[in-house]
Structure formats: structure tokens, C-alpha cells
Image: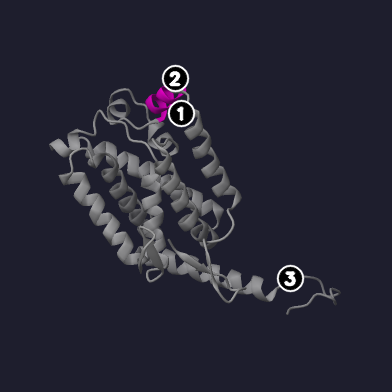
Amino acid sequence: MPRYHSPYASSFSFGPGPISTALKLLIGVNVALFFAMIIPSVGEFLIAFLGLRPSRVLEQFWLWQLGTYMFIHGGLFHILFNMLALWMFGTELEHIWGTRFFLKFYFVTGAGAGLLTVLFSLLPFAFARQLYGSVIIGASGAIYGLLLAYALYFPDRPIYMWFVFPIPAKIFVLIMGAIAFYSSIFEAGGGIASATHLGGIAVGYAYLKQIGSNPWSEVKYRYLKWKINRVRKKFDVYSGGRADDWDRRVH
């Protein structure tokens, strides 16, 4: 887990800060659908209709599943860790990017990860073909995209792996990517989620790369803009105004 240092405090505190309206909405929809799935008949319908099944996307053109699968989770720990990661990493990225760019990145990486999973299921290998008739659910594709972006912005920020071992964000993402790659190929049944995890990383990188000549151009721009806005808020800097605003001050 990352530890966030507030410019207004002299000590570290747990978590990245309060949840924005956009994150509340994303988390709220996921949680609402999770509780709806407790009802057996409703749960079966939601998984069949909203979960990502490559065979239905390709044969029946259920294209909405490329986006809706992100809002369905299969268990308490599944949704707990995904939503916790969304809050921990998404909050700070939204502060840097702004809500519009953050939401765009989240849905592009999530849907892109789903599309790559569908394409992956067409490969002539047993570990890939198992995906064709399987159902993929969860926000992990988008979450892995956020992890990649977080590592690009804060490569040396410590993340507590398994809540115990602090390692730099850039190493954390490399480890998670390696685990996903290994699982997608060598673990029977493990490729269902792991291929989507890899897809989230790949799409996240490609999306940042297409914005500029390399992903660092967008990273540096957004990060510099964010730092400038923080300084403005810290010193209460006002822009514009009329000549008779004699009581407007900068402190």
C-alpha cells in the first residue's frame, strides 16, 4: 500500500486522502452489483449478461461485455482488494490528471484489457483456448492499468506488498506483471484472470504512449501541472480580478 504525505502535515498518514465523487460512483456501482449477486437468480443473470465471455462477444456480438465485466465480482476478497486498490492508487492519479482524464484512462484500460483477452482466447494454445468459453469478471484489468500509471509517476514510492514488505512502485509492478505472465501460460485455469491483468498493463502503457512520443511526456506534463496547482492552493494564489479588489491578498 502506498503511504501519502500531505503538504499540510508533518507526518505520514494511511491512505491517499478522501474519496472523490467519481471514485464514490465507481465503487458504489461495483458494491451495489456485488450485493445484487447475492440473490441467486439475479447473480446468475448478471454474470451471464454482464460478465465477459469471449465466445459470446465473437459469435453473438455482445460487445457491451467488454466494459460491463469490470463491475462484476465473484467474491468478497475479490471486490475488497480491487476497490481498495482503486481508492489507494486511483485517488492520487485523479488528483494529478483530473476527473475526466482519469475516468477515460480507467475505462479505456479496462475495456482494452477485455478486448485483448478476447483476442488472446483465439491463440492456438491450450492455455489460451480455455478462455474462449470462460467468463471473466472483475475490475482487475483497469486496476493493473492504474498500477502501471502509478509506477510511472511515483517509481520510488514504497508499496507494501501483502501489507508487509515495502518495495518501490516500479519493482512492484514488474513483479505483478511477471506473476500475471507466468500464470497466464503455465498455471492451469490461472490464465483467465492473468491474461486480463497483462492486458491492463499493456493497454495502460500504450494509451499513455500514444498521447506523446513516449509515456513519460504525458507523465511529466500531468505531474508538473499537479504540483503547480498544489502550490497555488497552498499559498492561496488568486488569478485575475479587478483593479478595485483592494482586499484580495496572496499569503
Determine whether the residue tagged by mark 1 lies in a helix, strand or loop. loop
Tell me the residue at 25%/28% (across/down): 133
Q: Residue furthest bottom?
A: 251
The answer to which quarter of the image holds residue 139 is top left
Residue at (44, 63) in percent of width and height? 2
Closer to viewer: mark 3 or mark 2: 2
Residue, disc 3: 240
First in residue order: circle 3 vs circle 2: 2
Q: Mark 1 and mark 2: span between their CA atoms?
A: 8 Å
| Residue farthest to the front, as pictured | 164
In the picture, measured across the screen, residue 51 lies left or right of residue 18, that is: left
Nearest to the observer: residue 221 or residue 172? 172
| Magenta segment boundaries in residue numbering | 41-50
Q: Does residue 208 appear anywhere in the picture?
A: no
Number of the label disc, if any, that sits on residue 37: 1
Q: Is residue 151 left or right of residue 246?
A: left
Pick whichever, 182 or 247, lies toward us. 182
Mark 2 — residue? 41
Amino acid found under the numbered disc labelled 1: Met
How crowded pointer 1 is (Cα within 10 Å; few <14, some 14-19, many 20+) is rated as many
The CA distance from mark 3 to mark 1 is 52 Å
Q: Which of disc 1 and disc 3 is earlier in sequence?
A: 1
* Image location of residue 81, percent across then percent down: 42, 48
The total number of labels drawn is: 3
Which quadrant, please, contains the C terminus?
Answer: bottom right
Give coordinates of residue 10: x percent, y percent. 58, 77
User: Tag on residue 118?
Assistant: none
Residue 137 picture location, percent across and down: 37, 36
Q: Secondary structure at mark 3?
A: loop
